[in-house]
Image (tube, rainbow, N blue to C red):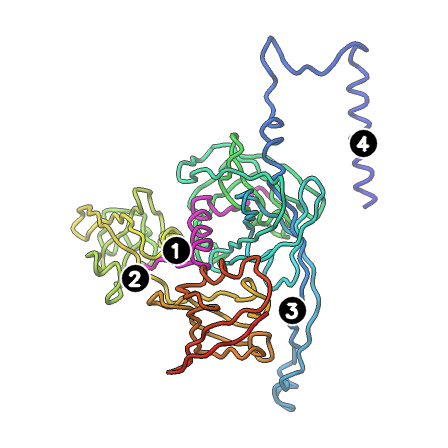
């Protein structure tokens, strides 16, 4: 702290000397030779109100660490010896829909949070509710109820080029809203083992702890990415930051809003990235891309005609450099969507396939985001679009108390039939009073009351 104070004093003194050397009548010019001095201020005036501070509070379970020697003599710790510990955290978020109050942030910012408080730039503090999350891509959607919100328009991040200017907005270290600038350093970064689905924008705009979930914008003030991670020896900024591209964010958030979950599309191939060694061994005509080792039976890839030995080089006309990048691009496209996959066949010929992606079978929703009495339940849309499957129930949770069981199917509320989680969420939104969930349990129909 003392060293920081000395540095600040030095900066102020230097500025004073520089300004005092100017003539008394001199003012810093807004223009030179009739041309305005370049400044990001006009753009930022319209954009920064859309970037918010997120404060979270909650508890997580702490399990005691027992040395192996103690385990040998006394056995493993008994259940119930773990304890809950309160935590607090800070992050950033971006308002993407002012009318609905939708805010995008990183999943790791709000994971396990019991309370989520949004602080707007004008100082208002509003409690947010969690609409949906996707741990695999580290995206979360929140919602607040407030007037006079400002939203950021999303750009098409597929049109970005290395060298384009990029501005990061967030609240690092809880200091308050901060703006830094740089360029797009690289595109399609993957294989970093930060998330399961990676297709990052790399930037040298300074990103630090607390910037997570904040905005990366272009010079027009459009959202090109959500800041999510940094690469540094001690967690500090060294000019290598990563953001989730806006196109990927838009795909994922659209699914959460429509279905209440991310219906991740699955191609149905496994493989590895092409490198010089693999290219030489397989006598490939390319040095980049995703080499297909296996095609799953009855998968979207098999139905389209993709075969083992193919090298996937493009998705929807955009180059794919690695298998990790391929996974990231496909993983953000929803099930049922059609994509153009370009491959190089073993004979060296290029071929294009129109592939309709199939649905991943691993998608669960934390039901507490829908209604407080459903807390402790994990829900999944029925594959036949005929209700909501109850996949898990936490012991002694509100969901367990009202009588919900694992294996139940929720197919209605009151006398309204439900097809999916989104319809349940919309029905319960802003409603008060008593509701009756229509449950199918084996061959029995029953009602469970919630309030």
Task: State the separation of the CA atoms marked 1 and 4.
Answer: 51 Å
Mark before the other along the chain sequence, 1 or 4: 4
The numbered mark, 3 or 2, whose residue comes first in the sequence reads 3
> Is residue 404 part of the magenta span, yes or no?
no
Q: Secondary structure at mark 4?
A: helix
Residue 331: mark in rendering? 1
Which residue is tagged 3?
60
Q: Residues within 10 Å of mark 1 (few under 14, many from 20)?
A: many
Report helix, strand or loop for mark 1.
helix
- Place residue 48 in its image quadrant: top right
Q: Is 347 or 94 nearer to us in this picture?
A: 94
Q: Quadrant of the C terminus?
A: bottom right
CA distance for labels 2 and 1? 11 Å
Q: Is residue 183 left or right of 117 when viewed as pictured?
A: left
Question: Which residue corresponds to the image point at 43% horizontal and 40% vertical from the top-left?
Answer: 157
Mark 3 closeness class: few <14, some 14–19, many ≥20 residues within 10 Å: few
Give the Cα separation between the discs numbered 1 and 3: 29 Å
Between marks 2 and 4, how big is the CA–CA gap?
Answer: 60 Å
Q: Which mark is residue 10?
A: 4
Residues in magenta?
238-266
Nearest to N terminus: mark 4 or mark 3: 4
Q: Nearer the viewer, mark 4 or mark 3?
A: 3
Residue under numbered circle 2: 268
Which picture quadrant has residue 18? Answer: top right
Residue 288 position within the rendered picture, expressed as x and y whole percent measured from the top left: 32, 48
């Amino acid at each position: 702290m003392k060293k920081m104070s000395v540095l600040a004093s030095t900066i102020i003194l230097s500025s004073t000397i520089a300004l005092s050397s100017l003539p008394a009548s001199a003012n810093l010019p807004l223009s030179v030779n009739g041309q305005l001095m370049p400044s990001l201020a006009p753009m930022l005036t319209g954009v920064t109100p859309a970037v918010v501070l997120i404060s979270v509070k909650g508890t997580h379970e702490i399990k005691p660490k027992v040395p192996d020697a103690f385990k040998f003599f006394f056995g493993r710790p008994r259940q119930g010896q773990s304890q809950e510990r309160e935590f607090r955290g800070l992050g950033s978020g971006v308002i993407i829909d002012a009318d609905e109050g939708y805010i995008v942030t990183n999943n790791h910012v709000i994971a396990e949070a019991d309370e989520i408080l949004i602080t707007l730039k004008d100082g208002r503090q509003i409690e947010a509710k969690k609409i949906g999350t996707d741990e695999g891509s580290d995206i979360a959607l929140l919602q607040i109820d407030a007037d006079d919100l400002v939203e950021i328009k999303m750009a098409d991040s597929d049109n970005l080029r290395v060298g384009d200017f990029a501005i990061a907005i967030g609240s690092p270290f809880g200091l308050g809203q901060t703006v830094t600038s740089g360029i797009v350093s690289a595109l399609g970064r993957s294989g970093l083992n930060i998330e399961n689905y990676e297709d990052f924008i790399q930037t040298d705009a300074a990103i630090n702890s607390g910037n997570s979930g904040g905005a990366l914008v272009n010079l027009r003030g459009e959202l090109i990415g959500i800041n999510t991670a940094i690469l540094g020896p001690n967690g500090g900024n060294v000019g290598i930051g990563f953001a989730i591209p806006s196109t990927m964010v838009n795909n994922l958030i659209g699914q959460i809003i429509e279905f209440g979950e991310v219906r991740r599309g699955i191609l149905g191939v496994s493989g590895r990235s092409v490198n010089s060694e693999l290219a030489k061994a397989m006598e490939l005509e390319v040095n980049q891309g995703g080499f297909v080792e296996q095609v799953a039976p009855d998968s979207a890839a098999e139905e389209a005609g993709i075969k083992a030995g193919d090298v996937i080089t493009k998705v929807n006309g955009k180059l794919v450099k690695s298998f990790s990048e391929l996974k990231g691009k496909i993983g953000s496209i929803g099930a049922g969507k059609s994509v153009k996959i370009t491959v190089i066949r073993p004979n060296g010929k290029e071929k294009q396939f129109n592939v309709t992606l199939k649905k991943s079978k691993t998608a669960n929703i934390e039901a507490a985001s829908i209604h407080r009495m459903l807390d402790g339940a994990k829900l999944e849309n029925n594959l036949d679009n005929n209700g909501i499957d109850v996949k898990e129930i936490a012991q002694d949770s509100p969901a367990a108390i009202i009588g919900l069981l694992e294996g139940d199917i929720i197919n209605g509320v009151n006398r309204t039939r439900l097809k999916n989680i989104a319809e349940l969420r919309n029905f319960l939104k802003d409603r008060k009073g008593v509701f009756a969930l229509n449950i199918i349990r084996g061959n029995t129909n029953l009602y469970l009351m919630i309030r």
